[in-house]
Image: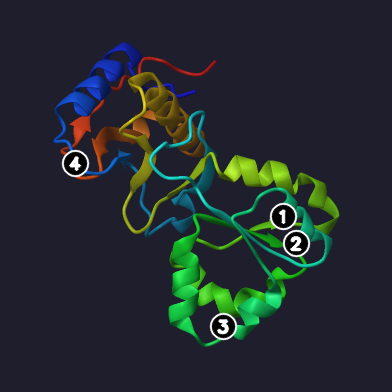
Amino acid sequence: MSQVLVEDEVLKVISEMLEKSPKRRFTEAVDLVVLLRGIDLKRDPNAKINEIVELPHPPKNRPIKVAVIGKGEFAVKAKEAGADRVIEPEEIEALAGNKRALKKLANEYDFFIAQADILPRIVRYIGPVFGPRNKMPVNLPAAAVSQLPAMIEKLRRSVRIRMKDQPVVHVKVGSRNMTPEELLDNIKAVLSVIERKYEDPSKIAKVYVKTTMGPAYELPISYTKRRR
């Protein structure tokens, strides 16, 4: 778990954010914004973070949708596991050159899983559209199809944290109808992944939490705790 959060104080700030942020006619997401320092992305592109994080408590405002690309037993298993959509590779090939349809497909689902031996066949079609949207499929070998149900369920509890051109991470960590304790657990899960990536907790400069349309609240952090 995270080494930098002052948990008692963070709970107070999260509670204040939920109480004081203006109410909307819809259930807003709760976002986490992490500003990092001492990271030069131009000199070291590998310093960017791009990882999937399983949350202890999935957001309650909107279900996370997972689509599976595969055929044969892989597609059958995906349907049995309750994938939100199962896509045959021929369907992807039929969309070749239709960027509008590919964009719609990419935007409709949060995560994609692809049968590993099929991905090389379709990557030239989906890559230019899915890549910039950070929707490239997670690979799973056909021989590991028994793992597909568990992977689908894991992704339904997950978010992807990604850094673009600036050392900033902006990610959804829950929804406004969650408790402060649930949001804290999710925030700790995300921060722990960032801390493992950069090894030095002091690289985390500022941490903010906010509702979708509300103001940002800074979370108290401390660097006095260190891993053993």
Circle 2 crowding by C-alpha within 10 Å: few under 14, some 14–19, many from 20: many
Hey, which quadrant is residue 151 in on the image? Answer: top right
**Does the rendering let one see residue 79?**
yes
Residues at discs 2 and 1 in contact (Cβ within 8 Å): yes
**Which circle's residue, 4 or 3, is located before the other in the chain?**
4
Taking 123 as reference, is 84 above or below it? above
According to the picture, the residue beneath numbered tag 2 turns out to be: 75
Q: Which of marks 1 and 4 is nearer the N terminus?
A: 4
Q: Which amino acid does label 1 sit on?
A: Ala
What crowding class fits label 3: few (fewer than 14 Cα within 10 Å), some (14-19), or many (20 or more)? some
Residue, disc 1: 78
Mark toward the start of the polypeptide (1 vs 3): 1
Q: Position of residue 197 (x, y in %)?
A: 50, 39
Q: Name the residue under label 3.
A: 95
The three-letter code of the residue at mark 4 reads Arg
Most extreme residue toward the bottom is 97
Q: SS at mark 1?
A: helix
For residue 186, side relative to residue 212 (left or right): right
- 165 lies above or below 129: above
Residue 24 locus on image (x, y percent): 19, 41
Q: Would you say 220 lies left or right of 125 here?
A: left
The disc, 4 or 2, on the residue closer to the chain's N-terminal end is 4
Residue drawn 31% across and 19% down?
222
Residue in the image at 58% along x and 79% along y: 125
- Residue underneath mark 4: 24
Which amino acid type is marked by label 2? Ala
x, y (%) of residue 15? Answer: 25, 20
Is 36 or 83 nearer to us in this picture? Answer: 83
Q: Is 140 placed left or right of 201 in the picture?
A: right
